[in-house]
Amino acid sequence: MVIASTGVFIWLGGLYFTIHGVLYDVKPEFRYGMLALALGILIFVVALNPLAQRRSGKRDGPT
């Protein structure tokens, strides 16, 4: 859960920099914001992937 929340904060920071870069026409800020946005979403999805939990045996109850 800590890793997933870190991914969300990276995503929010990337969203801020992307919008700021678009509004003020700052290309490097827009590019790095988009990179952080994609990285944050990737971290969030990988951290909460249910298939990884199923394979590791950490799920509650029978499968």
Image (cartoon, rainbow, N blue to C red):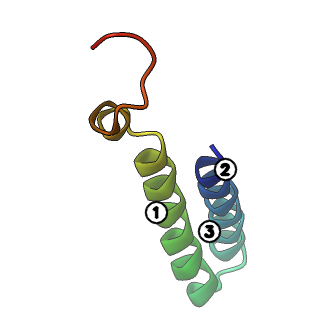
N-terminal of the pair, mark 1 or mark 2, is 2
N-terminal of the pair, mark 3 or mark 1, is 3
Q: Nearer the viewer, residue 55 or 23?
A: 55
Q: Where does the N terminus fall, quadrant-wise?
A: top right
Please name the residue that numbered disc 2 is placed on.
2
Name which residue type carries label 1.
Ala
N-terminal of the pair, mark 2 or mark 3, is 2
The image quadrant of residue 61 is top left
Question: Which residue appears at 60% of the width and 54% of the height?
Answer: 3
Asked if the residues shown at circle 1 and circle 2 are in contact, with their CB atoms under 8 angstroms apart, the answer is: no
Q: Where does the C terminus fall, quadrant-wise?
A: top left
Q: CA distance from mark 3 to mark 1?
A: 11 Å
Q: How many numbered circles does the render carry?
A: 3
Question: Which residue appears at 65% of the width and 85% of the height?
Answer: 26
Q: CA distance from mark 1 to mark 2?
A: 18 Å
Label drawn at residue 18: 3
Question: Which residue appears at 43% of the width and 56% of the height?
Answer: 42
The x, y position of residue 60, in whole percent, is 45, 17
**Which marked residue is nearer to the observer: mark 2 or mark 3?**
2
Please name the residue that numbered disc 1 is placed on.
38
